[in-house]
């Protein structure tokens, strides 16, 4: 199975009021995804959502604590943003976050120097823009997705057009021969070490 065509669907900004619906779709389709969580959204009542993500084989990653433009933050504040979120996830469900996605994909040398995780961007569905229709979200994912791609979507609050687009995205990717894995799995199965300094990944082959 070395040459499976792989894609990693990733979701930012949760947990939110649509995260369970995303998980319902992934479960229905029998596939996994990767969730980049915002620390301040991980309130105690969200614990069952994190537990469910792990129970379904999904991966939980770090999307900072306050979702600020981190390129404007000091080294100390950057480290605090990352640590608070990783600590919260570890305390709640006992896993280590292995990847980081910068809010707004804002980058700085200070961030690279102080965040000890691979940075992930991803193939953009533009689903963070409310004016992007469900059909355009589908089209954006399908345009340019390739073996090794990490697809960037959002399980942010009220993002129902992504719920609408997701079953079609999965169906169309499957029709193109893709299998669905987590961020950790896509690097591992392709034999790529994600720990490259000053690098942000959108595809494991870039
Ligand atoms: Zn975000």
Image (cartoon, rainbow, N blue to C red):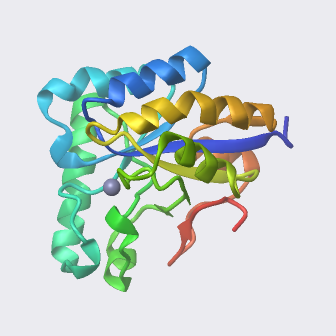
Answer with left or right where residue 7 lies relative to residue 51.
Answer: right
Residue 61: give x, y in percent of width and height: 39, 46
Q: Quadrant of residue 129?
A: bottom left
| Residue that appears at 32% across and 73% down | 114
| Residue that appears at 20% across and 77% down | 73
| Residue that appears at 25% across and 29% down | 17
Residue 88: give x, y in percent of width and height: 20, 42
Classify 187 as above or below 165: below
Report whether residue 32 is seen.
Answer: no
Classify 63 as above or below 182: below
Classify 74 as above or below 24: below
Residue sitting at the far bottom: 109
Q: Quadrant of residue 74?
A: bottom left
| Residue that appears at 34% across and 39% down | 159
Which quadrant of the figure contains the C terminus? Answer: bottom right
Residue 152: give x, y in percent of width and height: 50, 52
Answer with left or right where residue 82 lies relative to residue 203.
Answer: left
Which quadrant of the figure contains the N terminus? Answer: top right
Instruction: Name the residue nearer the viewer: 129 or 118.
Output: 129
Report whether residue 55 is seen.
Answer: yes
Instruction: Name the residue nearer the viewer: 16 or 84.
Output: 16
Answer with left or right where residue 179 lies relative to residue 185.
Answer: right
Classify 6 as above or below 82: above
Residue sitting at the far top: 28
Count of number-bearing discs: 0
Residue 184: give x, y in percent of width and height: 57, 45
Instruction: Name the residue nearer the viewer: 7 or 156.
Output: 156
Rendered-image quarter of ligand 1: bottom left
């Amino acid at each position: 199975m070395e040459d499976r065509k792989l894609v990693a669907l990733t979701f930012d900004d949760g947990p939110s009021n649509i995260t369970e619906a995303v998980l319902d779709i992934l479960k229905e389709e029998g596939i996994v995804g990767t969730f980049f969580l915002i620390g301040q959204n991980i309130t105690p009542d969200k614990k069952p959502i994190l537990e469910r993500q792990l129970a379904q084989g999904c991966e939980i990653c770090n999307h900072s604590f306050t979702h600020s433009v981190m390129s404007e933050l000091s080294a100390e504040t950057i480290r605090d943003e990352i640590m608070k979120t990783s600590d919260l996830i570890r305390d709640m469900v006992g896993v280590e976050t292995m990847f980081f996605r910068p809010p707004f994909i804002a980058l700085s040398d200070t961030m690279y120097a102080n965040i000890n995780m691979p940075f992930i961007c991803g193939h953009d569905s533009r689903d963070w823009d409310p004016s992007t229709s469900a059909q355009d979200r589908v089209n954006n994912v399908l345009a340019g997705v390739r073996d090794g791609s990490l697809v960037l979507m959002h399980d942010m609050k009220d993002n129902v057009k992504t719920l609408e687009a997701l079953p079609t995205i999965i169906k169309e990717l499957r029709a193109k021969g893709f299998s669905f894995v987590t961020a950790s799995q896509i690097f591992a199965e392709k034999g790529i070490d994600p720990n490259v300094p000053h690098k942000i990944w959108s595809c494991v082959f870039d």
